[in-house]
């Protein structure tokens, strides 16, 4: 996998909206924050465009992303927020310039479309918090700090508490994944991921429990579970149930779906639609260690 160049003070970060619209009021404190950290910031021409819920038309969002891909000074592109809309433009974007001048692409949720698609091009990306989630007072927090650490090439290693559903073991391999709903929607497309021999990360938000069951069952039936060497489950936030209860939590649904396999599994990783949304380098080699006491995820490159 290709590792884009890590950033140093004075380098340039581009901000783009590939899905839902964002306002100047929401984005301006983040621009000030990044400049205070020593970075230059570039925004594309249509950054504050709006078309219903989208950040402008499909054509405008494509134009903005390509503008930053081609920008000679931009070394990292951070998506401002998720929502929905990246899948509408993924096939229109010319990613060719990234092959000769790789750049870090950062974000989570709907940005999983980009993580999955760029994995096919052999590019590492960063699953991370986004400007819409930065502190509104222009300060930093743990999630933002891990993003900056990932962008500047600092060592990444996370330890977190165990849950009763964890399965003990250790694996070393390439990390892939992101939002479960997005990965489910990409199946059968050219952005579909190959999970064989890899460690899969999953998170999700605002889904009915039976939807979680349907999606994880679909991944399992399509062969995306059986050949994993590890599974990491992050936030499964704000789940919904019907009048007649489904009878299991999202975590229990996933636990049940992988019980026949032997690879290590950990739940409760601090990433996803939760306050602690720690940066993950997708496409990087990691070591996942799940013991009785705790779980650790260490990035090897």
Image: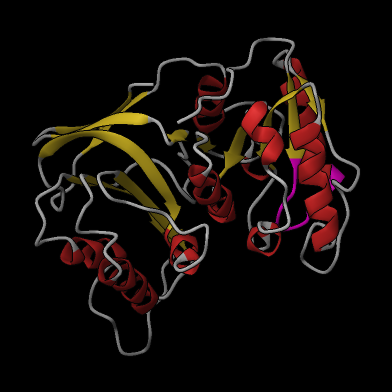
Q: Which residues are magenta?
A: 16-24
Q: Is residue 17 left or right of residue 217?
A: right
On the rendered image, what quadrant is the C terminus found in? top left
As drawn, the residue found furthest toward the top would be: 9
Observer-nearest residue: 123 or 217?
123
Q: Does residue 138 show up?
A: yes
Magenta stretch, main secondary structure, is loop
Q: How far across and how far down the image is residue 202, in percent?
A: 37, 53
Q: Is residue 128 in the magenta section?
A: no
Q: Is residue 285 above or below residue 55?
A: above
Most foreground residue, 215 or 100: 100
The picture places residue 193, in percent across and down from the top left corner, at 42, 54
Whether residue 30 is visible here, answered yes or no, is: no
> Magenta segment: does it hold 17?
yes
Q: Is residue 194 above or below residue 253?
A: above
Left/right of residue 301 with respect to residue 145 in the rendered view? left
| Residue drawn 22% across the image and 64% down it | 252
| Residue at screen point 44% across, 35% down | 280
Q: In the rendered view of the protein, which quadrant contains the N terminus?
A: top left
Colour approach in the figure: secondary structure
Point 78% across, 56% down: residue: 21
Residue sitting at the far right = 45
Residue drawn 29% across the image and 83% down it:
245
245 relative position to 37: left or right: left
x then y, percent, for residue 260: 9, 62
Give the x, y percent position of residue 266: 22, 45
Q: Describe residue 235's horizontal placement relative to residue 225 as left or right.
A: right
């Amino acid at each position: 996998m290709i590792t884009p160049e890590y950033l140093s003070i004075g380098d340039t970060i581009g901000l783009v909206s590939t899905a839902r619209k964002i306002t100047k009021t929401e984005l301006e404190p983040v621009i000030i924050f990044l400049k205070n950290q020593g970075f230059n910031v570039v925004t594309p021409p249509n950054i504050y465009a709006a078309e219903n819920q989208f950040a402008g038309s499909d054509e405008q969002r494509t134009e903005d992303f390509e503008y930053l891909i081609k920008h000679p000074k931009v070394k990292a592109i951070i998506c401002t927020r998720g929502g929905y809309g990246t899948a509408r433009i993924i096939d229109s974007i010319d990613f060719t310039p990234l092959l000769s001048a790789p750049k870090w692409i950062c974000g989570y949720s709907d940005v999983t479309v980009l993580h999955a698609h760029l994995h096919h091009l052999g590019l590492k990306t960063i699953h991370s918090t986004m400007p819409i989630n930065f502190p509104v007072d222009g300060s930093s927090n743990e999630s933002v700090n891990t993003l900056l650490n990932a962008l500047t090439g600092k060592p990444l290693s996370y330890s977190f508490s165990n849950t009763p559903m964890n399965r003990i073991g250790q694996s070393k391999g390439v990390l892939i994944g992101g939002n479960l709903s997005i990965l489910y929607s990409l199946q059968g497309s050219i952005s579909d991921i190959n999970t064989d021999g890899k460690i899969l990360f999953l998170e999700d938000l605002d889904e009915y429990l039976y939807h979680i069951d349907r999606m994880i069952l679909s991944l399992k039936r399509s062969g995306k579970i059986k050949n994993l060497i590890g599974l990491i489950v992050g936030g499964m936030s704000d789940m919904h149930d019907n009048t007649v209860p489904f009878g299991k939590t999202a975590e229990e649904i996933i636990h049940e779906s992988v019980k026949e396999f032997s690879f290590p599994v950990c739940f409760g990783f601090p990433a996803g639609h939760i306050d602690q949304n720690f940066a993950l380098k997708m496409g990087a080699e990691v070591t996942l260690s799940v013991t009785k006491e705790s779980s650790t995820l260490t990035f090897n490159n």
